[in-house]
Amino acid sequence: MNVHVLGVRHHGPGSARSLRAELERLKPDVVLIEGPPEADGLVDLARDPGLRPPVALLAHVPGEPSKAAFWPFAVFSPEWQAIRYATGADVPVRFCDLPAAHTLAVPPDTPDTPDAPEGTGDEGERAVRIDPIGALARAAGYDDPERWWEDAVEHRGDTPFQVIAEAMAAVREGHVPDAHEARREAFMRRTVRGAVKDGFERIAVVCGAWHVPALTGTPGRAWGAGLPAAKADDALLRGLPKAKVETTWVPWTYGRLAAWSGYGAGVTSPGWYHHLFAAPDRPVERWLTEAAGVLRAEDLPVSSAHVIEAVRLARSLAVLRGRPLAGLAEVTEAARAVLCEGDDLPVELIGRRMVVGERLGHVPDATPMVPLQRHLRAEQRRLRLKPEASERDLDLDLRKPLDLERSRLLHRLRLLGVGWGRPRESTGKGTFRESWTLAWRPEFDIDLIEAGAWGTTVPAAAATRVRDLASAAASLADLTALVERCLLADLPEALPGVLDALSARAALDGDVTHLMAALPAMVRAQRYGDVRGTPAAGLSSIAEALLTRICVGLAAAAAGLDDDAARDLVGHVDAVHTAVGLLDPGETAVEDGPKARWLGALRAVSRRSDLHGLIEGRLVRILLDAGDLDTDRAERRMSRAMSAGHPPARAAAWIEGFTSGGGLLLVHDARLLGLVDGWLSGLAPEAFVDVLPLLRRAFGAFAAPERRSIGERVRGLGRGAAQGAAEADDDVDDERAAAAVRTVLAILGRA
């Protein structure tokens, strides 16, 4: 009986290549791999060509999505190569780490829990805060552990497993493992004993190099000598908490393999390691050639001469630094200096596309899945929406049946908490356009497993989820937003329940600001019902009822507000005004129509004497822009607001509210600009300092051309308002403008 313990570095291409060669030499009759034993039944799926790395074993506790762990595998992971060897040679594979049933049963804040459950064996190293590679690198005179590992292992033709075992024994000398690490290694030893008891003669154990000394015992003697006795290991493992877990394969990404994305046993450059594994011959030349291709795809001029010179530079740097082969640092510097000509932006592109990589794995249909996952996979194929790790933009035209179906799927997934698609501002015009940014993340599989409790298909699960959200909604605005999301996702079966909850909540909610916050989403929902052809009966009556109650209660809600409350109310007023424009899109207000009632309410409120200056100024501007107030009356209102009877701070707030609709009015109306200029010029120095922040905020919101034009008009006011107005008129050539005026009038349908 021979037990061969092969210590590897997780996700190391050199270790992976050497391990495969060592297994082919040893020809073991069983392979034990560090990982959760619950996944033993999933190993045979590695024979399926549809299981393409990067992938991960997922173990989770059903109904508790926070209790989940991943064990990722890349094509250059030694564990994956061990699985591929074993399945190809018909050799049984067993995972030998502490079962996930135990590790996931421990609450996350328990000290014995590893720092991060996702991984394939570095948890013990993190728990005791020992970096064995860092210790060996320092002993060898390196200040960079990654560089030492590349030079000592990755750039060698083979991995010296015996030397690594001896080095780890030296690093671990005097080390006392913590409770969790001790249990993991006790279970590994138990698994080896079980393989011996089952009659296997040649046993290969593939584990993190850190654990090798705990599994080999005394060198030169039979396996087990110098190791803790079986009874001691059994006692250590007795009475551990246990949870019911399920396991499966899920796609993984190189972005998640990178250490900066939170995976403690990861590598910072998975794309580079993939390249080293896939191209063992002439890796530098092939890498820089591929980098040149990436830059050319972005229309950057890179020639073959650039590549040749970059290869020479990378090799020269390696020689100067005493390295056996140019590493990632050298090829990156060569690419920056030669291919990118010193520009860091193309270097970042190479890093994103190649050093980290944008690869997403794939699992076959035979993989254990909840019905919701299977339905989503079918929908992705039907709608030709391939999940990808890299972000990509998707523009949809909702008039096309395929794009409309895609939109509905993405909105339904968002209701289920699966953020595969993120809405972004549309690049086109019109309500028929919709834009998304898509990027698939491995954790979405956990979200789908959790959402599987709501239904077996995406529409059914989303509809059930909507009903649950409606019953738990905390505010009226939440319910109206849910109505909007329900229509976007085309869930007519769930809409009546949400509308009933909305009507009941609206009847009892007397806070006008709550009603104002709810109305815009309701109006948008009504519009989406028209655009998407979604049945939306009842939305119009609810929107009308909300608007009526807002108009009645607005006067009381606007009285006696402080600065923050006034600013919040102005935001609500602007949102409702926009929504009313969608309800009643005509240029003129129809008598007793939504716009007429809304403007009437604003007109009545604007006459109150107890209004905050910000509110009054904003209402006057809205009425002026809507044609409900002429310029003369607006000037009188402004003049009164800036009279000496009002404090400077209130006058400044009034101006801020009035100008929040844009500064073009001050550009084209010299009298209004003159009022502001005269008031500002007449302020005492102390008052000017007090109102300056308000004015800076108001005028700072204007576009740069507006500010420039206002400055030019103010300079004209220095020679007198009348003269400035005359100069403004002189700037216009009536004869040249006549043709443009006629065209605009024709577009507007006016004579």
Image (cartoon, helix red, strand yellow):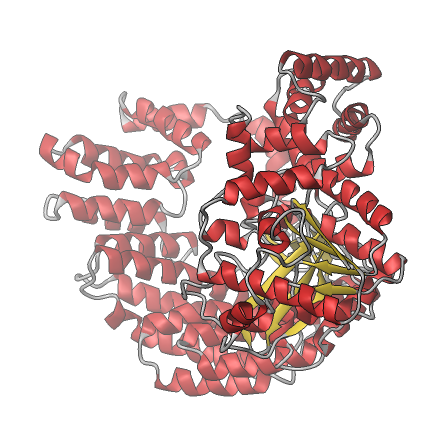
Residue at 44% x, 58% y: name it.
178
Q: Is residue 116 visible?
A: yes
Identify the residue at image location x=89%, y=58%: 89
- For this rendering, which residue is in front, 206 or 716? 206
Residue that protrudes farthest toward the front in the picture: 221
Frontmost residue, 719 versus 362: 362
Query: Looking at the image, which residue is at 43% across and 61% down?
Result: 575
Question: Is 446 placed left or right of 75 in the picture?
Answer: left
The number of numbered discs placed on residues in the rendered structure image is 0
Viewer-proximal residue among 4 and 210: 4
One can see residue 589 in this view: no
Q: Residue 618 location in percent, x, y?
A: 32, 53
Question: How far across and down, in percent of the image, does residue 368 sit?
Answer: 75, 73
Residue 118 pos. (x, y %): 58, 58
Reply above or below: 190 against 731. Answer: below
Task: Residue 321: name its quadrant.
Answer: top right
Query: In the figure, is residue 65 to the left or right of 513?
Result: right
Quadrant of the image occupied by residue 3? bottom right
* Rendering coords of residue 565 (x, y %): 25, 60
Extreme residue toward the right, this view: 89
Q: Nearer the viewer, residue 499 or 431?
A: 499
Vertically, is 371 above or below 665?
Answer: below
Residue 551 image-quadrant placement = bottom left
Q: Quadrant of the N terminus?
A: bottom right
